[in-house]
Image (spheres, rainbow, N blue to C red):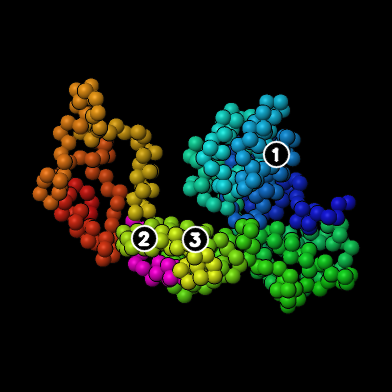
Amino acid sequence: MTTNKPLAERVRPKKLSEYIGQEHLTGEGAVLFEAIKNKNIPSMILWGPPGVGKTTLAKIIGNELGLQFYQLSAVSAGVAEVRKIIEDAKMFGKVLLFLDEIHRFNKSQQDALLGAVENGSVILIGATTENPSFEVNNALLSRCQVYVLKELEVDSLQKIVADAIAHDELLKQKKIVLQETDAMFMFSGGDARKLLNILELICNQPQQEIVVTNQTVTKLLQQKIALYDKGGEEHYNIISAFIKSMRGSDPNATVYWLARMLDGGESIEFIARRMIILASEDIGNANPNALLLATNTFQAIQIIGMPEARIILSQCATYLASSVKSNASYLAIDEAMSTVKKTGQLPVPLHLRNAPTKLMKQLNYGKDYAYAHVFENNFIEQEFLPEKIAGTTFYDPGNNARENELRIFLKNRWKEKYEY
């Protein structure tokens, strides 16, 4: 019996029948249940919050399929490690690679996997807490199925605790009475690994009888552990609350969640980067100064550092929360990218093409292009979109003072061509 492993590792399920939660994927008849049963597993991305069973599910798949299993963390691994596994696949015929935090791999690192994933010699299981549409290259994403893992429900958390007490060799040596579990569940934040760490901490007492109550759990945790894990993934929920508070125009909640992150030692650069994204995604042209301030904030905190950087972050965060909101630019680029996927690589109209050579000029590249600055109001109506999608409106200005001005401007220029 191995006693130096943490409880979460000792009780980690090894078979699908032992796996708790994610019934929409692993329950009888569900997509992964059938794939494992038929031993026909595609490469996949497991997307979900921390502690919901991504790593465990990957290991179970490896056990059930009997494949050579490799596990890498994108935080520390590089292209060399990936290539070594691809070479091993030639010897074994097929291997399974579990890549944790796949969103931390850069483009060249992700590209190194493409060939092996495409030819099936490597079954890739990537795990991420971030939206893979934003963090994983389209080329790799198109070769993988994306499965969303949900937050664990209370009944799943209760079963995880009960199973650990019933089956772990060390816990079975004590009499553990679960009088109350609300505090354990609250402090774990729905993270099964953190829940088991808390249970182990509670039970790691000299007495043989352990009575678990909300009061004893709270008292012990306040003495022993930090509730915000800056080095792991626990920032996930806090940063979400921070962003949503700014988006919801609540500066009071915004500065509270900012304080929670700063108190927990969160990277100030990480906070500032997320504010830059929000300034464009949720405010945009309704208040262009928001992006300028957020960008300057990122530069300023790097110069100043903590503790004074907290003041700069607070100024920017409360400004963004108090600003008028618009997601029109965000919606515009998503709609445009969706159109590109649907219509493919439409040809650039001839009059918009560059004509650096004589042959290109003979082919009418650039012919009939009208230089806007030589016309009244620096504008002349001409077609800038491919013919197939001419007249398509992607950018619909938001209903706010600044973008209403833009709407009037565009309407005056384009009349009925676009829907403004």
* Location of residue 323 by image quarter: bottom left
Q: Which residues are magenta?
A: 314-328
**Residue that badge 3 annotates:** 302
Dot 1 corresponds to which residue?
A: 70
Q: Residue furthest front?
A: 303
Query: Which residue: 19% across, 56% down?
Result: 409
Residue beneath disc 2: 292
Query: Which of marks 1 and 2 precedes in the sequence?
Result: 1
| Residue 275 lies in the magenta-colored region | no
Whole-percent x, y for residue 198 in the image: 74, 65
Q: Residue 200 in the image: x percent, y percent?
A: 78, 63
Q: Nearer the viewer, mark 2 or mark 1?
A: 2
Task: State how far apart marks 2 and 1 are (Cα).
Answer: 44 Å
Reading the chain from its start, which is encountered first: label 2 or label 3?
2
Q: Provide the secondary structure element on which disc 1 rests.
A: strand
Residue 223 relative to residue 230: left or right: right
Q: Is residue 33 visible?
A: no
| Amino acid type at image mark 3 | Gln
Q: Are marks 1 and 3 in contact (CB under 8 Å)?
A: no
Q: Which amino acid, by three-letter code, is at mark 1?
A: Tyr
Residue at image x 16%, y 44%? Answer: 372
The answer for how far apart the CA atoms under marks 2 and 3 are is: 16 Å
The C terminus - image quarter: bottom left
Instruction: Specify few, some or many for label 3: CA neighbours under 10 Å numbering under 14, 14-19, or 20 or more.
Output: few
